[in-house]
Amino acid sequence: MEIMSQLVQLAVGQMQLLHAVDTFPRGGLCQGGALKEALRRYERLWLPLIAAQAGPGSARANGQQQQQQQGYSALVPPLDVAFLWHLHRLQPGLYAEDCCQLKGRDGKSLQGALAVTAQQAFAFSDGSDTAGAATAALWRKAYPNEPFWPPAAPGSQTAAFRSRLAADLAAVAVRVPVFTHQLLRACYVQLPFLSRAVDRYAKFLLLRKHHLELQHPIPPLDVALMWSAHMSVSGEYARDMLQLLQRPFADMPGAGASPWLERDASGPWRFHWADSQRAWLEEFEEPFVVPGSGYVPMDSPHPAELAFSPQLLTLLEEQGPPAAAAAAAGQQKQSSWRAGAHALYLLWLQNPNLLRRMQQQLAEEAAARQPQPPAISPPLPVSKPLPQPAAAPRKKSGGLFACFGCGGADADEAIDAAAQQRQAQQQQQYEQQQQQQLAAPPKPVVLPLLSEGELKKLAAGFSSFKNLPMSSSHLYWQMLMPRDATTAGDASGSAGGAEVELFAAAPAAAAGNGQSKVYADAGRQSDQGLVTGDYEVVMGSSPALLW
């Protein structure tokens, strides 16, 4: 399967999308009015738009249809639409059913939208980049009264909306923060860990092929990440499953989050998990759950959430008349259902050194990719000579040693040679000092962290979607790009880059805020391991593996 070589990149794109969803203001995108408005925009606006661009989706397409397909694959949706589109494709059977039954504008079929490219699978834009601007122009032309980004606040159209999709996307969306909550660990930005997850996903597919008796094989977290990334490239996933299994493989429940949500309950997933683990051990004789892929309970908050005051975090919640009316009635404001990535982004905003380090890292990587010109030996630099003392008047031949018949000339020449040698040594020492000063790296400038008042000024724009990473081209997403760790087999290894510094800064910031006890308790719990019913969760021996 060719897609295997792209799975790491796709998994990173999926994590970026889920992180961005977690920073969505107005109470979050996984519940409430913002979710319902996103459903309306996806079903009533986006699906008809891509139907007009995708064409009929026939295998024997003519030149005009191929051109339509190219135009469709270049479309980049806004964040809320990209999120619902991703969740829809995580249910391949229902997605195909909806694309075959629903009609777009002018009665056009949606079958052409079944094939989503890898470049398009997790892209999202606020219209500021090139691809997003082109999509926004098509959107405004088709829907002059509907904003591309940011979405309008839920209104009468939202209240009157009723979905016609066979897939229940709202039920899936509410589980997503549980899935995202597991991914906020440093190992998920390290290339060795993700590469090993691709290998484990390939074994998981073989497990499904050899054990058809498994009703619902449930993967561990690292495998679930790769599975959902593969599934979101819907056209290639359908072809790969037919080639490998001779049947569709669409058994992932709830976008991979339902088993994590129901681990502590006495539901059916506990038995499916036990069956999957037993079959894996029989087939491969290796651990099913590895460090970094175990379950982190939702009541264990991410350290970044403990680093800030609740007043600062509530700036992402719903503002305006409804919130004011609830406050006037004495009702307590209900916090949104979030995974913790929103606090991680606040931590990045607060620390300008992380941004500077990332910019430097990107500049070094760009310089390394540039073709090097042929080496030309530069001319030797002309050293500035040291100031020379005034030369003493040379003695004439004769003098004290004239009586010995040498005339004193040899003694004068020896004195001159020793003086020249001393001057050459002084000049060499001077040049070495100059080279050492030029080669010495400049001392790093450590910028102070933003105060809570300065951070509040930036966060005040969140309600109007300012200062938020709402495009996949935002510099913040470079923090989630995987880079090599020090040890390929160590899930908690540190790459030493700015992306790992972000995750390392979270526990330190929580401790500085006097909130380290919660994280320490969770670390001790992970040391002992968690056993819940038939679940055996291996967390490893280091508290760093929990986050």
Image: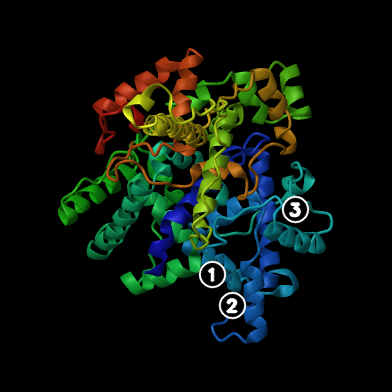
Q: How busy is the neighbourhood of tag 1: few (under 14 within 10 Å), some, or many (20 plus)?
A: many
Between marks 1 and 2, how big is the CA–CA gap? Answer: 8 Å
Q: Position of residue 36 (x, y in %)?
A: 66, 46
Between marks 1 and 3, how big is the CA–CA gap? Answer: 23 Å
- Foreground residue, 241 or 79? 79
Q: Are marks 1 and 3 in contact (CB under 8 Å)?
A: no
Residue for badge 3: 148
> Residue 57: which numbered mark, if any?
2
Quadrant for the C terminus, please. top left
The amino acid on which the numbered mark 1 sits, given as a three-letter code, is: Ala
- Foreground residue, 543 or 175? 543
Residue for badge 1: 115
Q: Say which label, 1 or 3, has the lower sequence index.
A: 1
**Quadrant in the rendering for residue 143:** bottom right
**Quadrant in the rendering for residue 117:** bottom right
Q: Position of residue 126 (x, y in %)?
A: 70, 50
Q: Position of residue 358 (x, y in %)?
A: 54, 40
